[in-house]
Amino acid sequence: MPSTIAIAGASGFVGRHLCQQLADQGHRVLALSRSGRPPIVHPLVEGRPCDLFSLLDAERAVDGADQAVYLVHSMLPSARLTQASFEDMDLVLADNFARACKRAQVKHTVYLGGIVPQLPDDDDLSTHLASRREVEVALAAYGMRVTTLRAGLVIGPHGSSFRIVTRLVKRLPTMLGPAWTRTPTQPIALRDVVDIISRTLTTPGAQGGTHDIASPDVVTYTELMQRTAEHMLGRRPKIRPVPVLTPKLSALWVSLVTSTPMELIKPLIQSLSHPMLASDLTHQQRLGVPGLNLDEAIAEALEGERQTAGKKKPAKPRKKPPAAPEGPPDVRSIQRLPFVHRSAAWVADEYLRWLPEGMRPFIKVEVSGPVARFFVRGVSRPLLQLELSEERSTPDRTLLYITGGLLARTGGRRGRLEFRSLPESDCVIAAIHDFEPRLPWFIYKLTQAPAHLWVMWRFARHLARLSPPNEAAARAA
């Protein structure tokens, strides 16, 4: 029976193919992306604009969906200045999506995550893989049924990981082989990923649980590069093993050779030291997807890239339209604060109470009803003015809009400060989104931006003193 399926990350290379397959099967697809443009032209595919850092955007985007697919992974900066790790951004995005799905009564979500290697100590996981698993927990934290599909490297046309492999073998006939190139892995073809997600959504009894998905072939990254080179160039590159090459140097080397941002390369390289092997392929076998072997997957991916490259580009218009003016520079800043067994509303109140004490004698805070104003001593006009959004705030999420002040632009993006507590988490998130500074950009980066990080660091230390085992102190506050 056809259903309405919302896809977060629809503009990515997995999302585009999934939109096409589900629409061809007769399902209505809500393709969520920042631009709102549908990734393909199809009468059953509706593009919806969605900035997943905004809970309100997420709620509007998934409205009317029966099921959802979450393909988002935020490893690149999302603002002109991003003061946040990718794992913190991923946690906020997943929490927003889960809250929105709960509100919209979405029955089931499929999440495409990463294979988690079996290690003696979970603390040995790379930051990248630990973040993937944290997203699994966040998506399921509000009682919604979630099916997690864990995959290693996805081999498909224009996929970021496979593009790194093809650029390496194309540009380097001889290369060094750090220790991670000898790590075993079990990649999977894009076609198989799309088939498994589609059948998980549409097959009765296939929903729920955590499942590894992979091709039947186990290879090292050296073998993967050599076999890719054979398909591309008809030869195998010489890969000389080296005993010592740190992950940081490896990331720098791969980034320079492949012209890929370090923000993307570094977490991936850290993960490559773990064997990325599937422990059980029962789920995909029950769905009738045994998986292409590695050579078939590589050949299909390269053919897809050749077909795309061979398509004629649309003719350029005679008169080039004027470029859209760029908006003011924006800022995103996310910090994890110690969990004090209190609600986000309590943490927000404590922040406003602590700030004048913690910043004495520089900062003064005046709270009048839902409005808080920050002053510097001796200046009558506020530096910042925050206004509580009572309609959008709950005990586990306090939202304050930045509505004025000498240091903020208003009237463009809706700058906001939020505090949120998350189920199944040992932290509280403090985040600033879409903030537009009034100071000249270079002055802002040298003054106000580091000052904010320093203030949040001091507030985190204050909260830590209220955390267990000092629970009595928290009750007295």
Image (cartoon, grey):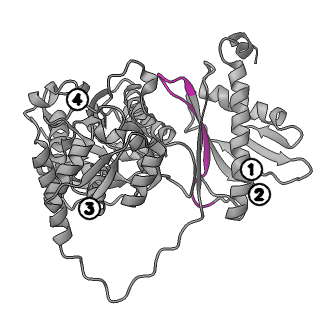
Q: Which residue is mark 1?
A: 384
Q: Which numbered mark, 4 or 1, is in the foreground of this view?
A: 4
Residue type beneath disc 1: Leu
Q: CA distance from mark 3 to mark 1?
A: 53 Å
Cβ–Cβ under 8 Å for marks 3 and 1:
no
Helix, strand or loop under label 4: loop
The numbered disc on residue 278 is 4
Element at label 1: strand
Read off the magenta span: 411-427
Mark 2 lies on residue: 406
Direction from residue 263 to residue 343 in the image, left or right = right
Task: Look at label 4 and name its amino acid.
Answer: Ala
10 Å crowding of disc 4: few (<14), some (14-19), many (20+): many
Vertical order, 61 against 392 (above or below):
below
Q: Marks 3 and 1: which is nearer the front? A: 3
Mark 2–mark 4 Cα distance, whole angstroms, equals 55 Å
Question: Which label was assigned to residue 170?
Answer: 3
Q: CA distance from mark 1 to mark 2?
A: 6 Å
Q: Is residue 95 magenta?
A: no
The answer to whether the residue labelled 4 contacts the one labelled 1, judged by CB atoms less than 8 Å apart, is no
Q: Is residue 449 visible?
A: yes
Q: Residues within 10 Å of mark 3 (few under 14, many from 20)?
A: some
Residue 328 drawn at (x, y percent): 60, 64
Query: Which element is circle 3 on?
Result: helix
Q: Residue at x 7, y 33 (%)?
A: 288
Sequence-earlier tag: 2 or 4: 4
CB atoms of marks 1 and 2 within 8 Å: yes
Where does the C terminus fall, quadrant-wise? top right
Q: Earlier in the sequence, mark 2 or mark 3?
A: 3
Classify residue 364 by image quadrant.
top right
